[in-house]
Structure formats: C-alpha cells, structure tokens
Image (cartoon, rainbow, N blue to C red):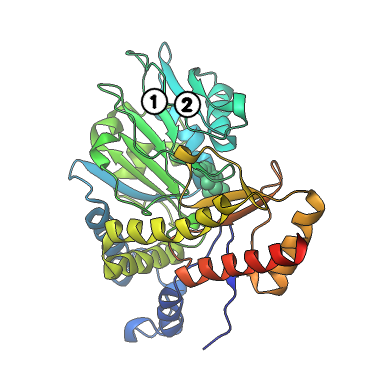
C-alpha cells in the first residue's frame, strides 16, 4: 500500500482511502465505458447517472424531505454569503445573523456590501469567538436567521440548533456537513463547501426548501439565482463533474460505515481522544469553552510560540501535517474530519505525550 501520512488539514482535507482507491481504479476506464469521468459530457447518460446517484444518496443519508432541492454549485461557501441575501433578503426587510467567527463575519459583511439590512443578534467576539452564544432574541419579522454550524478557525460548534419558530433558518454547514445527523426540516437552507468533509474542492452543496425558490428576484446574475439553479439541479451550466463524482463516492462510504449516526459516534470517540489529552494537564491548552467544543476542528496552544513552532516541525517529521493554526489566530489546530481515522487521532496523542516528556 502507498505510504500515507496523518492528514489534519483544515480543508481541503483527508479523504477516505477506499474512496481514493475506487477513483483510482476507475480513472482511466469508468465502469467499462472506455473513458474517464474527467472526460465525460455532463449531458451524457453516464454522467447523469453519477449526478442523480449522488443526489439520491445525499437525500437518503441526511433524510432530506421531498420538498427540498439538492444542488451542487460553484463559487464555494463564500459565494453563498452573497447568494443567500441576494435571493432571500428583499429591500425593506432585515435578516438576523449570529456572529461566531471569521466565516460568520464574512457572511455578514457580504450581505452588507450588497446594501442589505442585517441585524447581528448575538456575537461571541467579546471572548475571541471561543463559545457559541446561548441567549439571543430572534426578530420575529426577520427574513431569515443565519448561523455557522461549525467554526472551522476557532473550533466551536453548535451542539444543537436553535428553534427559530416561523423564521427561516439558514446555515453555513461547511465544516461539519455529514459529520452528524441533522434534522433538515428545521432549516430553510443549508450550504456547505465540499472540501472540508465530503469531497475535494470545487463544489458547494446547497439544500434549499422549495418554497424559497419563489423569492429569487429576476434582476440578479443567473449563476446567483437559486430558482434558475434549481430548475435542473446542478446542470444549468457545466458543473464540477469530477468533484461531484468524488462526493458521490464519499456518500457511498458514509452509507457503508452505517450512516451519519454511526459517523457521529466515531467522530465523538475520535475527538475525545484529543480533548482528554488537552484536559490532562496544562502543557497543552484547549482554547474554547467546553460546552462549545467542535468535533471537527480542535485548536490548542502550548506555552510559547517557539514551542508551538517546534511542535509543528517535529509533528511533520513524524508524518503529521496540517496543524498550523489559521493565520488569523496562530497556535495549533488539528482537524478531525470524517476521513481522519481513530488511528491518526491516537498517533497524534502519542506524539503529544512524547513531545511533552522531551520539553517539560
Ligand atoms: C472553509 C469555510 C468557508 C469558505 O469556504 P470556500 O469554499 O473556500 O468558499 C466558509 N464557511 C466555513 C464555515 C468554512 O469552514
């Protein structure tokens, strides 16, 4: 087998070995069709089968009700920061946002850039985004409430989602999508960049409740119009064909391991291995409040930046990569997405124990 390193990248990130092998096996000759998925027409029946299968598996895995549409779009989660208000926030209305970190801030700023009225009803900025706000009042007449399920940079995660009553809930689920079961009908719209948890870069999953499609104004760019994008989902123009194919393989893998409840169980066990280590003494220090801890991105600090640099360097020498904290916050961050194995989690903690012994 190929030599594989322990990949703790924040995104693009680790993919399941089985998925990579399957893609490799079929790369030159997809299922005897004599060509690669990379070379197929997106209008061919061979490709249509791949797309429809990915859609179907996603609906099945997440239990997406029939009155929702699943789309694979481009432009990243970042384009959704603009598309959501462009489509769903008409003039004269205001939308609520909860600010839990860098990505949430960008979502807010993008809406404001479009001249939209935004109300930040809660923020954890007072404590450097190290917790998920618990108290907030949703404006009863808000066009929607926007939240960020998992804060990739700070390592906080909503443990449960707020009840929004009649107000539509819009969620950036980029970095914990398919890491646990979610009750899709609580949401009006979910979006997620594929490259954190369900595939390579290049596609953004949008799950939208169909009645919202009627809100899209006519005078916005075609590629930003949910209604047009949903008419023939993922096929208005050329979609990111190969990325969607890879997402499809990841979804099959998720089904095979037992679905999202099982995936969550595995993710809880994996994260516990590292959190238990962080809680053991103060050589390593977790940076977020315990009841807001993310299962996906686990940031921590050492006593000095010099020691952190040494840690990263030695980790790399031990085949562990991707743990440099985001440039805006520094420190260490280990990302434990779905495809990161328990073996990698244990290897990291063993390395941390060893590093502590040598440096204290
Ligand atoms: C990575 C990330 C984004 C940005 O995603 P792009 O696909 O690079 O645009 C947005 N939100 C969250 C929560 C993320 O983790």
Q: Farthest residue in the bottom direction?
A: 1
Question: Residue at coordinates 37% horizontally, 38% vertically from top-left?
Answer: 226
- Dot 1: within a 10 Å radius of its alpha carbon, few (fewer than 14), some, or many (20 or more) residues? many
Mark 1 vs mark 2, CA separation in Å: 8 Å
Question: Residue at coordinates 36% horizontally, 20% vertically from top-left?
Answer: 143
- Residue 162 makes an appearance in the image: yes
Residue indicated by mark 2: 98
Question: Residue at coordinates 58% horizontally, 62% vertically from top-left?
Answer: 8
- Dot 2: within a 10 Å radius of its alpha carbon, few (fewer than 14), some, or many (20 or more) residues? many
Q: In the displayed structure, does residue 77 sit left or right of residue 52?
A: right
Q: Position of residue 239 (x, y in %)?
A: 43, 57
Q: Position of residue 64 (x, y in %)?
A: 23, 47
Q: Which mark is residue 145?
A: 1
- Residue 49 makes an appearance in the image: no
Q: Farthest residue in the left direction?
A: 66
SS of the residue at dot 2?
strand
């Amino acid at each position: 087998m190929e030599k594989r390193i322990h990949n703790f990248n924040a995104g693009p990130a680790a993919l399941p070995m089985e998925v990579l092998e399957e893609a490799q096996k079929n790369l030159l000759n997809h299922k005897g069709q004599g060509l690669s998925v990379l070379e197929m027409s997106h209008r061919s029946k061979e490709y249509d089968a791949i797309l429809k299968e990915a859609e179907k598996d996603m609906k099945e895995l997440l239990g997406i009700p029939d009155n929702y549409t699943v789309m694979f779009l481009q432009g990243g989660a970042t384009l959704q920061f603009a598309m959501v208000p462009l489509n769903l926030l008409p003039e004269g209305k205001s939308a609520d946002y909860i600010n839990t970190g860098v990505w949430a801030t960008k979502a807010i700023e993008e809406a404001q850039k479009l001249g939209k009225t935004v109300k930040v009803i809660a923020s954890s900025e007072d404590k450097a985004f190290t917790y998920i706000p618990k108290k907030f009042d949703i404006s009863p007449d808000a066009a929607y409430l926007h939240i960020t399920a998992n804060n990739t940079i700070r390592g906080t995660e909503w443990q449960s989602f707020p009840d929004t009553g009649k107000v539509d809930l819009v969620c950036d689920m980029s970095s914990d999508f398919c890491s646990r079961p979610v009750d899709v009908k609580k949401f009006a719209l979910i979006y997620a960049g594929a490259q954190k948890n369900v595939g390579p870069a290049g596609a953004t999953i949008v799950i939208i409740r169909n009645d919202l499609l009627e809100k899209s104004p006519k005078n916005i760019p075609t590629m930003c119009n949910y209604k047009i994008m949903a008419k023939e989902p993922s096929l208005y123009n050329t979609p990111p064909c190969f990325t969607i194919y890879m997402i499809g393989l990841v979804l099959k893998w998720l089904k095979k391991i037992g679905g999202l409840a099982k995936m969550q169980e595995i993710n809880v066990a994996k994260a516990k291995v590292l959190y238990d280590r962080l809680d053991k003494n103060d050589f390593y220090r977790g940076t977020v409040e315990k009841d807001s801890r993310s299962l996906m991105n686990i940031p921590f600090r050492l006593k000095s930046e010099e020691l952190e640099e040494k840690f990263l360097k030695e980790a790399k020498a031990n085949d562990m990569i991707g743990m440099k904290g985001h440039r805006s916050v520094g420190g260490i961050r280990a990302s434990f997405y779905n495809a990161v194995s328990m073996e990698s989690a244990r290897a990291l903690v063993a390395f941390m124990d060893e590093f502590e012994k040598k440096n204290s």
